Image (cartoon, rainbow, N blue to C red):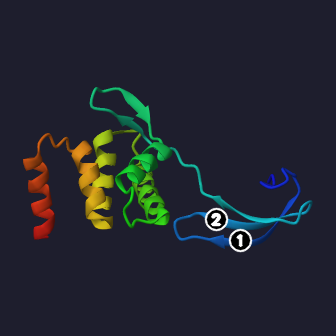
Amino acid sequence: MQCPYCQGNSTRVIDTTHHAKGGVRRRRVCKICGERFSTYERAILTAPLLIKADNSREAFDREKLARGVRIACAKRPVSAADIDRLVGEVEARLQSLGKPEIPARVVGDLVINGLKELDHIAYIRYAIVYLGFVDLHAIRNEIDLLLEA
C-alpha cells in the first residue's frame, strides 16, 4: 500500500475492522514518514448491465449513481455516510438479483424508494427528473401524497 503523504511503499496495518456490509477498514502507519491513514476495502462483484430506455446497454457505475444522489441531496441535512449507504444498498441489491442484465428502471426505483425514506426534499428533486414531472401540478400531487403519509 502506498502512503498518501510521502508516496512510500512501506506501510504496516495496525488495526482492522470488519463491517456488516462486507467491507473492511484498515488503519495503517507508514514506516518511512510515520503518518497514519485508513483504507477501505470491499469485494468487487460483477454488477449487471443496465438496459436503458432506448434498449442500449450500459455497465452499472457506482460513482455515477452516487453523483446523482449527491445532487439530489445538495444543501440538505443528509450525511455523506447516508448517501454512501444508500448507494451501497442499491449496488448490493442489484448484485443479489443474480441477473446479467436488468432494466435501468430497477435502479431508479431502488434509489427513489431509498430517498423517500432518507429525505423528502431530496426525493422530490430526484423524482422531478426520474419520474419526468412536466408541470407544477404533477409535483404538487407528489408532495400531497408525501404529506398524507
**Nearer the N terminus, badge 1 or badge 2?**
1
Name the residue carrying label 2. 24
Q: CA distance from mark 1 to mark 2?
A: 7 Å
Q: Please name the residue shown 29% across and 50% down the image.
A: 126
- Say which quarter of the image contains residue 60: top left
Category of crowding for the residue at label 2, using alpha-carbon neighbours closer than 10 angstroms: few (below 14), some (14–19), many (at least 20):
some
Rendered residue at 15%/64% (across/down): 146
Is disc 1 surrounded by few (<14), some (14 to 19) or many (20+) residues within 10 Å? some
The label on residue 148 is none
Query: Quarter-wise, where is residue 130 in the image?
Result: top left
| Disc 2 residue type (three-letter) | Val
Q: Please name the residue shown 27% across and 57% down the image.
A: 123
Residue 49 image offset from top left, x and y in percent: 42, 36
- Amino acid at dot 1: Thr
Q: Is any atom of residue 113 visible in this view? A: no
Q: Residue at x 30, y 57 (%)?
A: 122
Q: Position of residue 71 (x, y in %)?
A: 39, 50
- Kindly indicate whether the residue at mark 2 contacts the one at mark 1 (C-beta within 8 angstroms): yes
Q: Which mark is residue 16?
A: 1
Helix, strand or loop for disc 2: strand
Rendered position, 65 above or below 27:
above
> In the image, residue 20 lies at what x, y percent?
53, 71
Q: Secondary structure at mark 1?
A: strand
142 relative to 57 in the view: left or right: left
Confirm whether residue 27 shows in the render: yes
